[in-house]
Amino acid sequence: MTDLALRLTDVSKAFGLTRIISGVNLDVAKGERHAIIGPNGAGKTTLFNLISGRFLVSSGEIRLNGERIDGLPPHKINRMGLSRSFQITSIYPKLSVFENLRCALLWSMGYYYSFWTPLWIQRGLNERTDKILEDLNLTARRHTAAGLLPYADQRALEIGMTIAGGASVILLDEPTAGMSNTETDNAMELIRRVSKGKTLLMVEHDMKVVFDLADVITVLVYGRVIASGPPHEVRANAAVQEAYLGALVAA
Amino acid sequence: MSGTRSTQSAIWTVALLVAMLMPWLFYNYHTGRHSGFVVSMLSQMGMMSILALSYNMLLGQAGLFSFCHATFFGVGGYATIHFLNMAGDGGLPVPMELIPILSGLSGLGLAIVFGYMATKQRATAFAMITLGIGELMTTAALSFHHFFGGEGGVNANRMIGHSLFGLKYASAVQVYYLILAWVVLATLAMFFLTQTPLGRMANATRDNFERAQFMGYDPRMVRFLQFALSGFFAGIGGGLYAITYEIVTFDALAAPLSANALLMAYIGGSAVFGGPLLGAVLITLLQSGVSLLSNSWLVYVGVLFITMVMFAPNGIMGLVLAHRPVARAGLMGQLALPYLRVILPGLLMVLGFVGLVELTSFLTIGAAQGRTLVLFGNRIDVHALLPWLISAVLLFGGGFWFRVEARAFHRVWERLMAEVAPARALA
């Protein structure tokens, strides 16, 4: 099963008596771009929180590149090669854009908790940070406090911080939420560029983004997977149309 | 950026030169002596600078509210007394100049133990644990006589006869220069730490601990290491305290000193590296200077603190740095007149407030001490109505006028800020 980047087996999550996720099975192949869609409250973000270790699963098993990760804390899962972004922008608001990205590189470049390495002479690290700044079109904002960036730039930074560490599996939680059409196009272009050669799992509401970008779509309704497959199959699936897309098509 | 950096190094260099020259500005050439008061105040400023800077490794840099920072300062001090005694007996072949390293290691050792407990939590829970640790250690200092000496504390003779430079440290001014050297070393080391991966991730976990987790970092480990290292520097401060006073009592680790560390870091400005140092100098000046003039100096420190928290949460350095964009645009001149117009009523208001506080103080404590209030050579009758009336008019009249001027100032400020200023990252 080593060609699977992620495998969820019978994963469930309940908060008290409320079941949010019920017995989800999900396989994500290496290099695949996989989108999870579903109506509000379907449990998409909760599923992300389970995979990335933010929440503990109630039952079931999650494997990353064949190794079990359920029950591990987020930082250990991250070190095993999984990185995620947040639906509500999660950056370091008081640090400069440059520092935000550099922090994202530190662990993966082996600096760990070092308190004896002066950062200003780490040429490789600083050059790589600048390279990513360039990729994100944020070079002009290098010294700006991240909290003062315009919204679309913060979203780009969010994605940049997620991919910077070089994780092989990337989870993006509504990367284009709240963006205008042009901004969405730019973000899609960015995602396409930075996710090359990586496994991408994303939650997205914008159907245009989903059908343009994803190789496989999984539909989640009330914590259950009701369909999973390539875009054209999912589009044709009657259950999906009824539960989710139908409403959109009718509108 | 390079302009800012050279300005900064210029400021630091001037500050160091002033610190080095200060004892000689208060040198009495008739008696051939330095002013004892000034030298002891300067020494106190030095130790407090290290305490405040190390406290800010938690407060400003890692966003951790600790109420037990004096614990590591105090334990560094107690341990140093014992080191001095051992060295004096010939049992510890360490020269005086290096003793503070041992003090730091004592602080570090304890900070590792307590840090392991406290950093399991963050935010409020962390603060509560440190509050408990502080109280625990105060009690311990009063109970375990063998190490802490009970209420009387422990004492030593700093003339251990072992120095790298052949110095005896008999005079206070020699000790002052030893302190100054250690302040420079510790400050450089603490600044260096802010520029390392740990220092950066401390900032990151302060801003957003959850994101740091998804970058491979365990926020608890970051907190723990930062806590332990800050304990090391606090221990150095405590060591210098022990060397200076040759006696350490539980005051050196009790809650008021922890609160002082917080006060100094906050008033100086916790968002800027040098802020706490400025705060330490100012608060020590208030403590040593104003406490000679007034019984109520603590009231003034308290009011200053509340005012700063309410109106300038980034401290004095924050206020200064807020002017940077205006200064860069060369528009400081436009602020001169508005400032003058605010300062005048501000002074009247402060005068009125001080008047009321002093009158009250002389009515109660002063009377008990049998002292009378003398102003410009005139005895002032604190039971008469007039001085109270004048003070009240100054306070409220000045306050009202101040409000009007402050609004006008605010408008000028807003206009200037709109003209200049894309904001930049702080640190």
Image: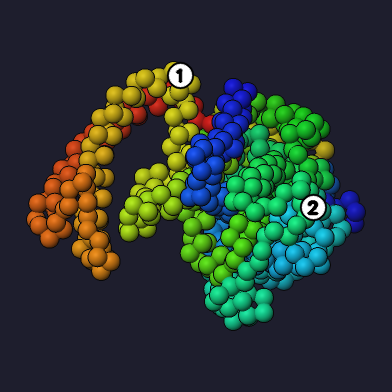
Taking B118 as reference, is A124 above or below it?
above
Quadrant where the C terminus of chain B sits is top right
Q: Chain of mark 2?
A: A
In the rendered image, the residue lying farthest to the front is B30
Q: In the rendered picture of this protein, how many numbered marks are placed on residues? A: 2
- In three-dimensional space, the C-alpha distance between marks 2 and 1, rounded to whole angstroms, equals 46 Å
Amino acid type, residue under disc 1 in the picture: Ala
The residue sitting at 61% across, 31% down in the picture is B13
* Percent coordinates x, y for residue B12 in the rendering: 59, 34
Query: Which quarter of the picture shows residue B108?
Result: bottom right
Q: Which picture quadrant has residue A126?
A: top right
> Does residue B51 show up?
yes
Residue A96 location, x and y as percent? 60, 35
The residue that appears at 47% across and 26% down in the rendered structure is B325
**Type of residue at label 2?**
Arg
Taking the view exactly as shown, the residue that stands out farthest to the top is B330
Mark 2 closeness class: few <14, some 14–19, many ≥20 residues within 10 Å: some
In the rendered image, which residue does mark 1 sit on? Answer: B329
Does residue A168 appear to the left or right of A17 in the view shown? right
The percent coordinates of residue B57 (x first, y second) are 61, 51
**Circle 2 residue:** A79
Residue situated in front as seen by the camera: B263 or A30: B263
Tell me where residue B152 appears, x and y as whole percent: 55, 75
Q: Can I make out residue A35 in this image? A: no
Callout 2: SS: helix
In the image, is residue A149 above or below residue B198?
A: above
Judging depth in this view, the residue of B419 and B11 nearest the camera is: B11
Q: Secondary structure at mark 1?
A: loop
Within 10 Å of disc 1 (Cα), the crowding (few <14, some 14-19, many 20+) is few
Disc 2 vs disc 1: which is toward the camera? 1
